[in-house]
Image (spheres, helix red, strand yellow):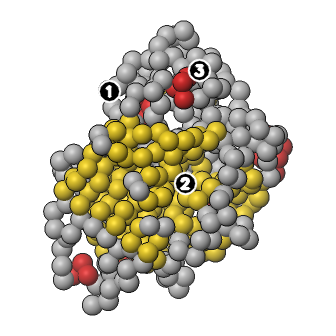
Amino acid sequence: MRLLPAVALMGVTGLLAGPALAATAAPSAPTVDKRVTLDAVPLGDFQSTVVDDHGVELGGLGSGLFALGRNEYWTVTDRGPNGEVGDARTFIVPEFTPSLVKVRARGNDLQVLDSLLLTTPAGEPVTGLPNFAVAGDPPPVLADGVTPVAYNANGLDTEGVVRTPDGHFWLVDEYGPSIVEVDASGHVVARHVPAGLEDDYVAAGADYPISGSLPAGLSARRGNRGFEDIALLPDGRTVVVALQSSVVVPGDRDRIITELVSFDTRTGTTLHEYGYRFDAPSTFAAGTRGRDLKISALVPVDQTHVVVEERTDTEARFHTVELDPADPLITEEDKTLLVNLAGVAGVPGKIEGAALKNRSTLAIISDNDFGFVPRAYGLDEDVEQSGVRTTYVEVKLD
């Protein structure tokens, strides 16, 4: 039986696990050890660029979780309060710009300690609007579901965050999909997109450098299923990113193979691409289809292993997997189950960020989609609150 070494990483001690472990020892039942929620903060109070928040509160920041120690984390919001109405994507607060948010889990509250607005090199907000028309993606409209909103070549739909030793942040984005470098002040330094798309961004008027550094095939990502999280490996320069679901394959909507990509942040180049096969849909709740499976979180373990979250809208499970350049397809034989959170009391829905706090504790955070009911609204109407709060939870493991 082979065990992975415990590795100290940015205050988080690595996980003891290994592919052979699953055959000899099943994990004990997980329990929620700590649960805190984000206070109600009007979006207009959080971000000065917001003209009218339409009653929306700060949320959506559970898209990533990067541990700093002392119960503090960097998180990142997604593109902002939005929803689907018919064949369109509504932007309730179109001037909202994705932001890095530093939080601390203390007592019963998830406290906001700091935030950074994402901007162009000239200091202009990038916004969360889509960049240009893409086949399969719904057009952007205002809250009423019909009034068009202009595209923005600088717009980002950020989903995960890490910070390298030089103080720069590295994010992933669903639109490109892309990997985005951001300096310590929030300025976008560079955006790495699938090869062949760089000219489209330049033609659309992007105000920061664009590089076609990623595998070209990633441009076939499904609508709203681009890169979903990013993990920084212990060398401080290699990141691993995950495509949320399978790329579009005509005639196969339920394909269950998606992609992991390793990337060198110092050279700006792709290192390896791995196919990742989800667990069989039949192992999830009855009626689950391949199209329902998503990767939403990545957690580094050591230089060759990461923890991958597979989830549906109702279930989440975490596997430890090995990144072996000689093995381009990760299958169930290459996975060790760390924890299955299905049915565990106190676990929130839509878990999109995760970190190993220590050897026995997995920290997770939910994306509450800004806590409003997605539907068409009048242009001067305030939203209806959903009552769903951003929730941070610590799960005690075996």
The residue under label 1 is 387
Instruction: Kindly identify the amino acid type of the residue bearing the numbered disc 2.
Output: Val
Q: Nearer the viewer, residue 43 or 21?
A: 43
**Contact check, label 3 and label 1, Cβ < 8 Å:** no
Residue 286 seen in the current view: no
- Badge 2 local density, few (<14 within 10 Å), some, or many (20+)? many
The residue drawn where x is 44% and y is 21% is 375
Q: Reading the chain from its start, which is encountered first: label 3 or label 1?
A: 3
Task: Give the Cα distance between marks 3 and 2.
Answer: 28 Å
The residue under label 2 is 161
- Image coordinates for residue 11, horizontal then vertical, percent: 44, 67
Considering the numbered disc 1 on the image, is that residue within a helix, a strand or a loop? loop
Q: Is 31 drawn above or below residue 42 in the view shown?
A: below
The residue under label 3 is 142
Q: Is 177 drawn above or below residue 330 in the view shown?
A: above
- Image coordinates for residue 260, horizontal then vertical, percent: 52, 66
